[in-house]
């Protein structure tokens, strides 16, 4: 065939450069043949040697492409082999460089001339575009005037048709003079009906007056009964107050009785521990008098006999009596304090039972509104009353859930993010709006830290809550608002302009400049 070698072997170069050249171009699949090869090459040769991509001969270069879908299909591109000039002698290179530089200079001059022509053409295009825009504006104005004239013509045609229809109907109506006898008869009949109605009205008025005269004594009696009922209610309230006072006294006496019985039991136990009960002691107890005064006399007589006993240390008995007196005083104070404490606890329980249900009802209203608002944004929330024996530790607990995988958690400064706390706060303010009374409310930058989805939902809920009848005025202060928010007619947006350059603008402001534009705007719209 005359194929001698591949293209990567016909020249020498450093290994790195040759490897790069082989990676960039298929030099190892490019073969070099002789003049005899050109006469022997055909499609069958390329089908049998699929690894041959390019074949160079002295006069012809063959580029072979194999089909991906048909292995037998081969496309051969035949081109004449160019003569080498890049690696020719140095003199030819200098001549070629000069020729290229001259050609480059001529091309550059051509580019500069074309750029100048392009600039002139751009200016002409700008002028033409201005003319086109002006012509378009004139055409639009003419089309608008045409549409307005057509609309006026159409309106006039409609009015003309309406007038013609009314005229036709009027012509079809009979002569009203022909109806004059019937109308007079109808008027007489109507006057007769009016007279009958006036007669009936007079009769009904007399009946009403007679019934009113009968009703007056009943109204006076009812008023007197109401006064009596009011007096009885007042007396009943006084009786109830007195009854509560006696009930309290009765409860205190019962408590004192219970404490006295407890003290008696303790005294008996103490006495039995000092001196166990024997038949002799029981006989002596039986001989004691039953009256309290006589018992006090017996006790005094026994204490006198006890005082008469001679002791080696007279201070012992005195110290014993003093301590016994202190113990009795302390027991009495303890009993009084216990009685007072139980009475106060009973009073506190009655007071708590009076206001706690009302507070629980308010909390239930707040949590219903709070939960409903959270459902609107696809989350869950609840408000609870944190009860405690210490009233200073009563609290309102706000529980929120922003994700499906978590449970309700108390709103704190560390558990939720800033945006979640802002959402919870504004929804809580909306929830308490129905149970609080205030002339107005101010919310400052509550939307800071929120994402756009939650901010849009919260703004819609806030607007709906603030625009309900009977609600106080609400001010929302914010440095930014989202576009296309759902405003209502009751909402006003006020932009506060401030800065060092505002003084001159404010001094030169003239309201007539805005008011004077309105008639011109109305005239253009008409």
Image (tube, rainbow, N blue to C red):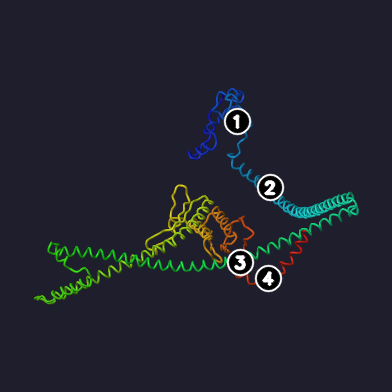
Nearer the camera: disc 2 or disc 1: 1
User: Looking at the image, is mark 2 or mark 1 earlier in the sequence?
Assistant: 1
Number of numbered discs visible in the structure rendering: 4
Q: Position of residue 443 (x, y in %)?
A: 54, 63
Q: Quadrant of the N terminus?
A: top right
> Which dot, 2 or 3, sits closer to the camera?
3
- In 3D space, how far apart are the residues under numbered discs 2 and 4 (Cα atoms)? 62 Å
* Residue at disc 3, secondary structure: helix
Residue that mark 1 sits on = 63
**Residue shown at the point (55%, 68%) measured from the top left:** 224
The alpha-carbon separation of the residues under discs 4 and 1 comes to: 81 Å
Classify 10 Å Cα crowding around label 4: few (below 14), some (14-19), many (20 and above). few
| Residue 396 spot, x, y in % from top left | 44, 59
480 over 78 or under it: above or below? below
Question: Which labelled disc corresponds to residue 509?
Answer: 4
Question: How many C-alpha atoms fall within 10 Å of the one at disc 3: few (<14), some, or many (≥20)?
Answer: few
Mark closest to the chain's N terminus, 2 or 3: 2
Kindly state the secondary structure of the residue where label 2 is placed.
Answer: helix
Circle nearer the N terminus (2, 4): 2
Tell me residue 36's x, y (percent): 60, 24
Q: Which mark is residue 207?
A: none
**Image quadrant of residue 216?**
bottom right
For disc 3, the marked residue is 217
Distance, label 2 to label 3, CA atoms, is 124 Å
Residue topped by disc 2: 107
* In this rendering, position of residue 149 left or right of residue 262: right
Label 4 element class: loop
Q: Are marks 1 and 3 in contact (CB under 8 Å)?
A: no
Residue at mark 2 to residue at mark 1: CA–CA distance: 33 Å
- SS at circle 1: strand
Residue at 61% of width from left, 66% of height from top? 217
Q: Nearer the viewer, residue 329 or 79?
A: 329
């Amino acid at each position: 065939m005359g194929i001698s070698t591949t293209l990567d072997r016909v020249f020498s170069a450093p290994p790195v450069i040759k490897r790069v050249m082989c990676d960039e171009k298929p030099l190892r699949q490019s073969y070099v043949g002789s003049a005899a090869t050109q006469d022997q090459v055909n499609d069958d040769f390329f089908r049998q040697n699929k690894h041959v991509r390019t074949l160079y001969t002295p006069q012809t270069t063959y580029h072979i492409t194999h089909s991906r879908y048909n292995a037998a299909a081969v496309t051969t591109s035949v081109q004449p082999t160019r003569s080498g000039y890049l690696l020719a002698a140095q003199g030819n290179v200098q001549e070629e460089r000069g020729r290229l530089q001259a050609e480059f200079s001529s091309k550059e001059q051509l580019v500069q001339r074309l750029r100048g022509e392009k600039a002139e053409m751009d200016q002409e295009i700008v002028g033409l575009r201005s003319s086109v825009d002006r012509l378009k504006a004139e055409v639009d104005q003419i089309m608008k005037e045409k549409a307005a004239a057509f609309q006026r013509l159409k309106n006039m045609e409609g009015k003309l048709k309406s007038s013609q229809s009314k005229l036709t109907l009027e012509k079809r109506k009979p002569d009203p003079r022909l109806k004059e006898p019937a109308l007079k008869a109808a008027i007489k009949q109507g006057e007769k009906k009016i007279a009958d109605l006036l007669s009936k009205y007079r009769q009904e008025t007399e009946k009403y007056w007679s019934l009113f005269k009968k009703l007056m004594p009943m109204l006076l009696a009812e008023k007197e009964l109401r006064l009596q009922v009011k007096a009885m209610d007042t007396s009943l309230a006084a009786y109830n107050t007195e009854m509560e006072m006696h009930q309290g006294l009765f409860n205190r006496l019962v408590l004192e009785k219970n404490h006295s019985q407890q003290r008696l039991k303790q005294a008996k136990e103490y006495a039995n521990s000092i001196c166990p009960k024997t038949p002799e002691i029981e006989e002596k107890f039986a001989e004691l008098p039953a009256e309290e005064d006589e018992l006090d006399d017996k006790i005094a007589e026994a204490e006198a006999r006890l005082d008469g006993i001679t002791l080696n240390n007279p201070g012992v008995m005195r110290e014993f009596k003093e301590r016994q007196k202190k113990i009795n005083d302390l027991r009495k104070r303890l009993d009084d304090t216990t009685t007072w404490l139980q009475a106060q606890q009973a009073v506190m329980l009655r007071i708590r039972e009076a206001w706690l249900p009302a507070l629980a009802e308010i909390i239930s209203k707040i949590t219903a509104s709070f939960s409903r608002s959270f459902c609107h944004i696809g989350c869950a929330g609840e408000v609870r009353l944190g009860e405690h024996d210490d009233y200073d530790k009563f609290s309102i607990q706000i529980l929120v859930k922003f994700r499906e995988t978590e449970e309700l958690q108390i709103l704190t400064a560390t558990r939720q993010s800033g945006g979640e706390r802002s959402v919870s706060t504004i929804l809580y303010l909306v929830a308490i709006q129905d149970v609080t009374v205030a002339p107005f409310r101010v919310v400052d930058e509550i939307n800071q830290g929120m994402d756009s989805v939650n901010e849009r939902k919260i703004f819609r809920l806030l607007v709906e809550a603030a625009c309900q009848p009977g609600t106080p005025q609400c001010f929302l202060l914010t440095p930014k608002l989202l576009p296309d928010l759902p405003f209502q007619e009751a909402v006003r947006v006020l932009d506060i302009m401030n800065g060092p350059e505002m003084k001159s603008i404010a001094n030169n402001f003239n309201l007539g400049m805005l008011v004077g534009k309105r008639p011109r705007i109305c005239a253009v719209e008409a």
